[in-house]
Image (spheres, rainbow, N blue to C red):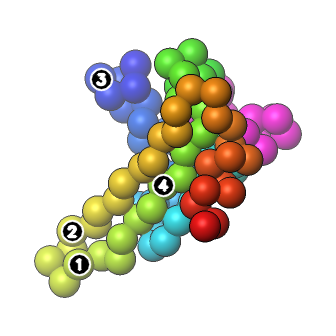
Amino acid sequence: MLVEEGGCATSHTIRWALDNAGPVSWRINRERYLSGAMSEREEKVHLRLRELGLIASVAYAMPILPTGIRSAFGLCFRPGMDQEDADRIWAK
C-alpha cells in the first residue's frame, strides 16, 4: 500500500518536500489527522504508518539542484519516542 499503490505520495509531508526546501515535522500529519483535514487516502496511509511504528519523524528537503533533481531524507525515531521528542532533538 505504501509503495506499490503510491501511498507515500499521498503524505502531506512528502508533498510538502516536493515543493519546498528545509525541514518539516510530522507533527503536521498528526494535526491534520486530529482536525479531520486528511482525505480518506491520507488517513489510511497515516494509520498504516502508525501500525508500522512510524509515529515520529522530521523530513528535510534539499533545494532543487541545477539539474532539476530534488532530494530529501526523513529521520524516524526509535520506538517509545513521540513527536515532541523528535521535534526537540531536531531543534538542538
Which mark, residue 4?
A: 3
Kindly give the residue lying farthest to the left in the view shown: 67
C-beta proximity under 8 Å, tags 3 and 1: no
| Cα–Cα gap, marks 3 and 1 | 27 Å
Which mark, residue 59?
A: 4
C-beta proximity under 8 Å, tags 4 and 3: no
| Cα–Cα gap, marks 4 and 1 | 18 Å
Residue 9 image-quadrant placement:
top left
| Cα–Cα gap, marks 2 and 1 | 5 Å
Image side of residue 66 versus residue 52, left or right = left
Q: Provide residue 25's location: percent of width, then percent of height.
A: 61, 54
Q: Provide residue 28's location: percent of width, then percent of height.
A: 69, 50
Could you tell me the amino acid type at mark 3? Glu
Could you tell me the amino acid type at mark 1? Leu
- The residue singled out by tag 1 in the image is 65
Q: Nearer the viewer, mark 3 or mark 1?
A: 1
Image side of residue 26 versus residue 23, left or right = right
In the picture, the quarter occupied by the C terminus is bottom right
| Cα–Cα gap, marks 2 and 4 | 17 Å
- The residue singled out by tag 2 in the image is 69
Q: Nearer the viewer, mark 2 or mark 4?
A: 4
Mark 2 is surrounded, within 10 Å at the Cα level, by few (under 14), some (14 to 19) or many (20 or more) other residues, namely: few
Could you tell me the amino acid type at mark 4? Ala
Camera-side residue of 24 and 81: 81
Mark 1 is surrounded, within 10 Å at the Cα level, by few (under 14), some (14 to 19) or many (20 or more) other residues, namely: few
Residue 39: in magenta span: yes
